[in-house]
Amino acid sequence: MKNNALITGGAGFLGSYLCQRLLHSGLKVFCLDNLITGSLKNIIQLKNDKNFEFIKHDISKQIVIKDKISFILHFASPASPVDYLKYPIQTLKVGSLGTHNALGIAKEKKARFLLASTSEVYGDPLMHPQNEDYWGNVNCIGPRGVYDEAKRFAEAITMAYHRVHKVDTRIVRIFNTYGPRMRKNDGRAIPNFISQAIRNKPLTVYGKGLQTRSFCYVDDLIEGIWRLINSDTNLPVNIGNPDEMCLVDLAKHIIRISQSKSKIEYRKLPIDDPKQRRPDISRAKKYLKWQAGVALEDGLIRTIEWFRQN
C-alpha cells in the first residue's frame, strides 16, 4: 500500500517544496492549508497529480482524516515578522491548538510526526553559534513572543506526545531560508532586498545592519528535512547554513548581483530583533550526514531571476 503524507501549511513557501519532494518519492500527499499566508500558486503545478490532494482547512480546528496516514509534517504557521505581527492570535493558535490537533492525528494513525520549529526558539541568543542544547533568551511578552513562544510550546507538546503516547516524532529547527516562491511582501531580508533592488528602490536596512543571519537555500533545507524524517533521532535538529554575514553586507551583495542602482536606507531597529543568528549543525552532520551545499552567490542568482520573472 502506498504511504500517505499529510502536510499542514502545504501551500506555503516551504510546504509546497515538501509536497513536491514527497510526491517525487512515491508518496500520496494531502496538502492542508487555510491560505492565510500560503498561496495556491505555490502548488498549481501539482494539481493534476493523481497522488496530490488539496484540503482547505485551518488545522487549529479539528478535522477528521479518513485515509491511512504514515507521515505528518506540521508546517502550518505564519513565519515572517510581517505575518505573525499581523496575525498574532492565529500564530499562537496554530502553534498550540494546531500542533495539538496534528499530533492527535499522528497518534490515531500511528504516523511519524515532524514539527517545523525555528531558530526563533533561541530568541536573541546569548550563546553563539546556537546548538540544540541551548534553552534560549526569549521575551515572552514582546511583539515577537507570539511566534517564539508558539513554537516553544509546539516543541514541548510534541515531546510530551512522544514520551507519553509514544508518537514517533521529529523536530527540525529551521534557520533563515530563502529561494523562489517567497512573497515579495514577505518582510524578511532577502525578499525585501531583492524586491527593492530589481526596482532600483532604496534597500531598507534596520539599525546599522550589523545584526547577523545565516542563509540557507531552500533546496538544501528540504534535503535536510527529508533526511530527518527518515532518520532515527527524536532530538531537535538545527537545519541551516552556518555561513554567517551581517545584513548590510547582504544588501550590498544583492545590489551587486542584481546590477541595481539602489542605495541603502537605514531605519530604526525593530524591538527584540536578534543580534546574531548562526546554527551549530554538528547534530545534523552526525545523525543526518547533512550540510548545506548551495553557495549564497548561486542561491541569490536563482532567487533574483525568479523574482524578475514573477
Image: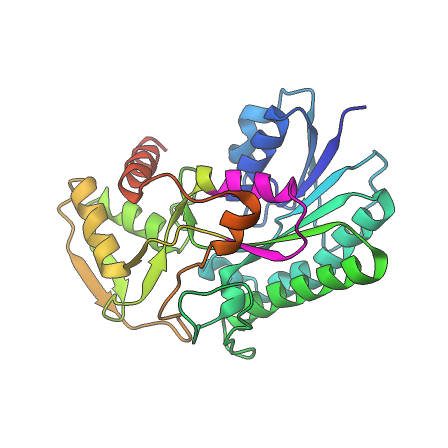
Pinpoint residue 246: horizontal percent, then vertical percent. 27, 61
Residue 232 is inside the magenta segment:
yes
In the picture, the quarter occupied by the C terminus is top left
Q: What is the span of residues highlighted in magenta in the rendered image?
A: 221-238
Determine if residue 174 is in view. Answer: no
Of 46 and 159, which appears nearest the observer?
159
- Compared across the picture, whether 214 is left or right of 77 comes to left
Q: How is the image coloured?
A: rainbow
Q: Residue at x 53, y 36 (%)?
A: 17
> Residue 251, located in which quarter of the rendered image?
bottom left
Q: Is residue 186 left or right of residue 229?
A: left
Q: Quadrant of the N terminus?
A: top right
Front residue (pair 309, 220): 220
Asked if residue 234 lies left or right of residue 205, the reply is: right
Q: In the rendered structure, does residue 267 fall within the stretch colored magenta?
A: no
Q: Please identify the residue farthest to the left as the structure is shown.
A: 261
Where residue 127 sits: x, y (%)?
43, 73
- Residue 108: image x %, image y %? 86, 47
Q: Residue at x 50, y 73 (%)?
A: 143
* Residue 5 versus residue 59 in the image, above or below: above
Residue 168 seen in render: yes
Count up the numbered dots: 0
Residue sitting at x 28%, y 60%: 247
Residue at the location (37% across, 72% down)? 270
| Residue 77 image offset from top left, x and y in percent | 59, 54
> As rendered, which of 52 and 231 lies closer to the eye?
231
Q: Is residue 140 left or right of residue 296?
A: right
Q: Report which quarter residue 182 is drawn in.
A: top left
